[in-house]
Image: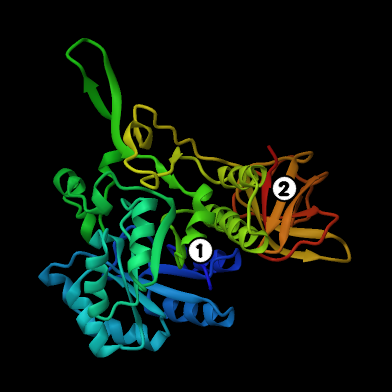
Amino acid sequence: MKYELLAPAGNLEKAFIALRYGADAVYVGGKKFSLRARASNFEIEHIRELCAFAKSLNKRVYVTMNIIPHDSDFDGLEEYLLDLNDCGVDAIIVSSPYIIEKARELVPNIEIHISTQTSITNVNTINYYASLGAKRVVLAREVTLEEMKLIKSKTKMPLEVFIHGGMCVSYSGRCVLSNHMTLRDANRGGCAHSCRWNYTLNDGSDLEKFYNMGSKDLMAIDYIPYLIDLGIESFKIEGRMKSSYYLATVVRAYRMVIDCYLKNGKITEAKLDEFKQEIKKAENRQTYIGFYNGLPGVCGHLYDNRSEIPTKEYVGYVMDYNEETKIALIEQRNYFTPGATLEFFGPNLANTTYQIDKIISHDDKIELDAARHPLQLLEIYVPFKLSKHDMVRLKN
């Protein structure tokens, strides 16, 4: 059985990164019908380019069409579906029965996957969408492991579950807080993440403190073996707004978890901890197991414990490597200096550390006392082989 690792992408660069770093498929949003209006999102020509790249790797592309549509949102629907079909899109992720109906009529070759926005938590609803022609269901984030087991025993419908990323304080993302506070419709792509704002909490005394309603992010790495044994077909990472470095790190870590378990039939606690530490190199939000073991309670929410300090470990992207001179061409991301111990990693490169000696400006060949300018091209000596698209971070 094939177990799919499904990754998000907010633009073409991120989609390429996710596929290179181990995702079996990516899901992206177009300019219309998507719930992430603030992501860069894809023009049709970019979707076409992505589909061609994915197929060259024998991988897949899904396009989100998961808004809760109002009458004005249907403009251009038929043309858009035909364009996606022409691009070679493998599936669309939808929540509207009408969009399902039009897709089956116009583009029967495109699979229909039912979005988590429909809050599917039971077999009867799954069977209903199967009768409409759906080929996969994304379960609501509120479904527990025990409920997944029951559902899996009663349906042959392929199931997709979230394993990592943001959680909504409302039921499966069906929130109107953003609408009320900012006039931005969360169910039509405009969520302002109002639950994560800092609010002033006053208990009647003179003491005031900040409070927010947001949920901790999901991290279900401990449950990957159980989900595999259960027969869940697709493991989904959330985060179309996340950076390329975040995607590379998180996708690669889950790829290693899945492959390790499939190869060995088990994962030791020590190995799991190693994978968790890898994820932490990109993660700057607090995490929890979501609803996997039941209602999260206090432990699953931020309240007054919010901590989001941007990490600056990611310092460079490998553009080229000269095997004769052992000089790496690096596109800089964050500040670092000569003498820094760097960790290099990539799709085919295990974490490898090296303390660099010099940093040379690529354009004028001047030796630098520090790398200060993001996107500047730099040359550094690295004694082991690197490949284009490898990444560089500070070793903590």
What kind of element bears circle 1?
A: helix
Q: Amino acid at mark 2?
A: Glu
> Label 2 to label 1, Cα distance in Å?
21 Å
Identify the residue shown where x is 26% and y is 85%: 104
- On screen, 137 above or below 296? below
Q: Where residue 382 sits in the image (x, y, percent)?
A: 82, 54
- List the single residue furthest toward the top: 206
- List the single residue furthest toward the left: 71
Residue position for label 1 = 14
Q: Quadrant of residue 75?
A: bottom left
Identify the residue shown where x is 42% and y is 77%: 47
What kind of element bears circle 2?
A: strand
Q: Is residue 209 left or right of residue 217?
A: left
Q: Where residue 181 sits in the image (x, y, percent)?
A: 17, 43
- On screen, 304 above or below 58? above
Crowding near pointer 2: few (<14 within 10 Å), some, many (20+)?
many
Residue position for label 2 = 343
Q: Is residue 254 left or right of residue 94?
A: right
